[in-house]
Image (cartoon, rainbow, N blue to C red):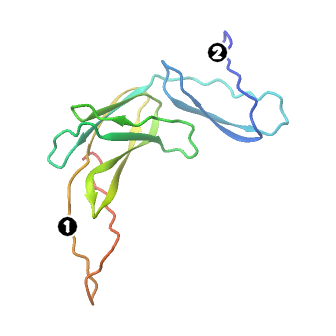
Amino acid sequence: TDADGTTRIGPLPHGTTALALDTPGYPQMRIPNVSVTGAEPLIDGGTIVVQPGATLQVDVLDASGMPVPGHEVVLEDLLPLSPLRFFPVRTNPAGRVVFERLAPGSYRVRMAAIGRCMGQALTLARTITVPVAGIVNTRIFAGGKATFRISSPTSPAKGVFVSAQPDDPSS
């Protein structure tokens, strides 16, 4: 980085390169992609204004509303081919994980459900929108059960896939 904040990267391969800023003190954020054709020796990506980062706090609760300590939570950028990488975090004794230095945008919070269903691990995911700055709090219940008897006019149906989506994403 030069004294005026100019950063040069390269050499870059021909094609589109997705870029991200990940420097302590600044939010982790995508910056505009660079399209390299070889026609220009130096591509000017312009000036990037970095806003303050936001914090996302996720409280993981079981079906009875009690905190779930030691549960792994993953954060993902929703934009395709994202160069942003967030390490999985385990909930603290109060069932909370904190992701800091987030740029504004939409993220997916993903984790395993508590327990298994018919021997299969289940995954929970929620989309969270993060503002320019501040703290976003969300609670995710990682437990709960429902029973269904699926049948056809001739007999019970076995091995039927059932998907679910809560109508209240804050619960």
Q: CA distance from mark 2 to mark 1?
A: 59 Å
Q: Which residue is mark 1?
A: 147
- Is 6 situated left or right of 168 in this image? right
Q: Amino acid at mark 1?
A: Thr
- Is 54 situated left or right of 83 in this image? left
**Of circles 2 and 1, which is in front?**
1
Mark 1, secondary structure of its residue:
loop
- Circle number at residue 123: none
| 87 up-or-down from 80: above or below | above
Mark 2, secondary structure of its residue:
loop
Does label 2 or label 1 sit earlier along the sequence?
Answer: 2
Residue ranking furthest to the top: 3
Q: Are marks 2 and 1 in contact (CB under 8 Å)?
A: no
User: How far across and how far down the image is residue 128, in percent?
Assistant: 38, 42
Indicate the quadrant where residue 119 lies.
Answer: bottom left
Q: Which residue is mark 2?
A: 5
Name the image quarter holding the N terminus: top right
User: How far across and how far down the image is residue 24, in percent?
Assistant: 49, 19
For mark 2, does the 10 Å Cα neighbourhood hold few (<14), some (14 to 19), or many (20 or more) residues?
A: few
Q: Residue at x 83, y 32 (%)?
A: 40
Report the front residue among 131 and 118.
118
Q: Amino acid at mark 2?
A: Gly
User: How far across and how far down the image is residue 94, in percent?
Assistant: 21, 32
Residue ranking furthest to the bottom: 154
